[in-house]
Amino acid sequence: MTVTTHRLGVIGLGAMGHPMSARLLADRGHLVITSRREQPELTSAGAELVGTPRELAERVDAVLTMLPDLPELEALIDGPDGLLAGAGDLLIMIGSTSSAPGVRDLADRLHTRTDGRVRVVDCPVSGGVDGATAGTLSIMLGGSDDDAARAAELLAPCGTPVHLGPLGAGEVAKACNQLVVSATILALSEATVLADRSGLDLEAMWTLLGGGYAGSNLLRSRKEKLVTGDDSPSGIARYMVKDLGFAHDIAESTGTAAVLLPALRAAFDELVASGWGERDISVARRFIAERDTRTA
């Protein structure tokens, strides 16, 4: 168990936040959480469940937020029950995939309003639910040296935290990650459709190709879904539209004439418009298989 004086809280106990909280709780022995729902698995293991963000902020000096995006966090900051109403010195670790300029803007506003008492680190993660459960996430940190070092210590039970640069650097890295993931899942899905329609044994093919240059963590985690056609939710496909939008913003701000990114955005826009947005990203196989050839 890690010996630390930092009091830690978590907001956002969804598909990623819940298993990460379990890892943090197992390491620390205590964790403060807030949720609209009862959390029996966490509270029975020692977590303290409080009713509002204010109550959480009163009890901790660092909070990990695993929310969909910045607007969901902004909604919890102000008001009589918001984070600022209970915050003393507080480090907010933003785990969502969000806009790097948006993170920096939020941090500047919080710094001004609290005379520097509330600070921000961005810490988006990669590795999915499997990685969150196993404690093997890649955790991309952006922020000052001191704050990033503190965040790295706190988040180490969840995986490998690496400080990549100033505030927003984690979000830039996550956008790059999502560019690679989206390209890879589309390639894997398209190859699966081609092989299936050609009569190949999909299990045998992906087992074979997985040992060569086509192998990847994404193939290992999604091989069964690709082979069986099971696209029950794990990594929700519609989030990729948002993530690729952030990648597009970075390309524009850096003067990068991206070759692949426009095609990836168009593909996921079409996938979501076709009604597959709530499925796992491996739904790309079904999307490609059912796509009208006249639109290709």
Image (spheres, rainbow, N blue to C red):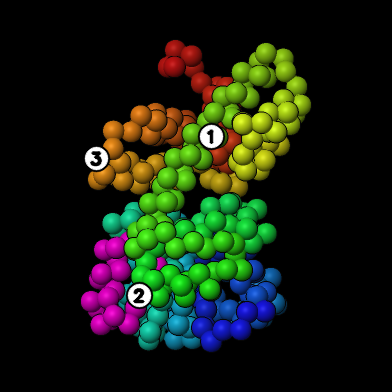
Q: Amino acid at mark 3?
A: Gly
Distance between mark 2 and mark 3 Cα atoms: 30 Å
Q: Residue at x 44, y 86 (%)?
A: 58
**SS state under label 1:** helix
Crowding at label 1, few (<14), some or many (≥20) Cα neighbours within 10 Å? some
Is 113 or 79 nearer to us in this picture?
113
Whichever of labels 2 and 3 marks the residue nearer the N terminus, that label is: 2
Above/below status of 274 relative to 174:
above
| Badge 2 vs badge 1, beta-carbon distance below 8 Å | no
> Which quadrant of the figure contains the C terminus?
top left
Q: Nearer the viewer, mark 2 or mark 3?
A: 3
Image quadrant in which you'd find residue 123:
bottom left
Q: Which residue is mark 3?
A: 255
Residue 184: mark in rendering: 1
Q: Amino acid at mark 1?
A: Thr
Is 163 or 188 nearer to us in this picture?
163
Q: Is residue 35 magenta?
A: no
Image x and y of residue 177, in percent: 47, 46
Q: Is residue 104 magenta?
A: yes
Question: Which region shows up in magenta?
Answer: 103-121
Residue 119: mark in rendering: 2
Distance between mark 2 and mark 1 Cα atoms: 35 Å
Distance between mark 1 and mark 3 Cα atoms: 24 Å
**SS state under label 3:** loop
Q: Residue at x 34, y 63 (%)?
A: 166
Whichever of labels 2 and 1 marks the residue nearer the N terminus, that label is: 2
